[in-house]
Image (cartoon, rainbow, N blue to C red):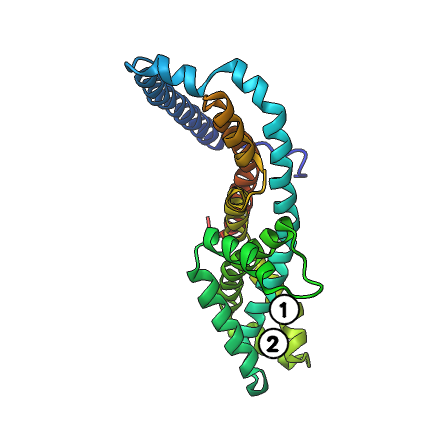
Amino acid sequence: MTVSEWRPSELQRERLEVRRRQRLRSVLLASASAVVVLGGLVALVVTSPGWPTVQATFFDLEAAKDALPAVLEGFWLNIRLFLLAEPLILVVGLLVAAARVSRSPLLFPVRLLAVAYTDVFRGIPTILLVYLVCFGVPALGLQGVTTSLFWLALVALVLSYGAYVAEVFRAGIESIHPSQVASATALGLSSGQTLRHVVVPQATRRVLPPLLNDFVSLQKDTALVVGVGLFDALGTASDTANYTFNFTPYVVAAALFILLTIPLARYTDHVGRRLMERERAGAR
């Protein structure tokens, strides 16, 4: 019998039909449950005594239309910060993680600095680090060092998130089974080649979902730069709200952040699901 001639048996067709009905039933139950829960929450909010005031203060359509161009212009600063910070954080995180997992006695000072870096910068709140870098570095009066708040805020974000990402990379590197390193050594690869060609690629695949989660958080934390006077989406919304005595610009800024975060969050779920399916391949 060829593959084209193969047909499922009657028993197999019954099994497939049962599975189809079970999936359909699950989808219908999930949809009904979502409608009931979300509908109940919406009804609870819109029937509350203060809803007319909240609607006029936070969800004024005309105020949203007026604020959108300015908030959108400020949001471009958040996007630029995110796009510039992300690759720099990856580089800093990977270098620090590689230093922490090194075992060479000559690299002990580097390893010590890497440990100090992750301990210190993970311990400082990101908003406080933004203040320290943006106000502290210009105060030093160093020649050739920028005083641009944008670039200093970028440095603060990279320093803060680089420490977190370094630990994520280190966890991935240390999760690689020692047999992989032993096999690479047996093939004649040096320690650096083993790390670059064998360990890091596997470790990166394993830590991809938590890395993407960190970058989702980074997207939101770019709004912390408003504390040093940069007019990002939050700063612009705050300025507009103070001028119009209406909080709708804050809702507009929040909506823009959500629109940027949701695709990355769904991509994180997709990557995590694919990795799980790959790990479970043949085990079902």
Residue ID at (59%, 86%): 106
Mark toward the viewer: 2 or 1: 1
Q: Position of residue 276 (x, y in %)?
A: 50, 49
Quadrant hosting residue 34: top left
- Secondary element at tag 2: helix
Q: Position of residue 265 (x, y in %)?
A: 52, 40
Which residue is at the front of the view, 205 or 264?
264
Gap in angstroms between the C-alphas marked 2 and 1: 10 Å
Decide if residue 163 is on the left or right side of residue 88: left
- Whether residue 262 is visible, yes or no, is no
- Secondary element at tag 1: helix
Q: What residue sits right under mark 1 in the picture?
A: 198
Q: What residue sits right under mark 2 in the picture?
A: 183
Relative to 12, is 132 above or below?
A: below
Question: Badge 1: few (under 14), some or many (20 or more) residues near its Cα, within 10 Å?
Answer: some
Residue ID at (49%, 56%): 129
Question: Badge 2: few (under 14), some or many (20 or more) residues near its Cα, within 10 Å?
Answer: few
- Asked if disc 2 and disc 1 are in contact, CB closer than 8 Å, the reply is yes
Which residue is at the front of the view, 10 or 112?
112
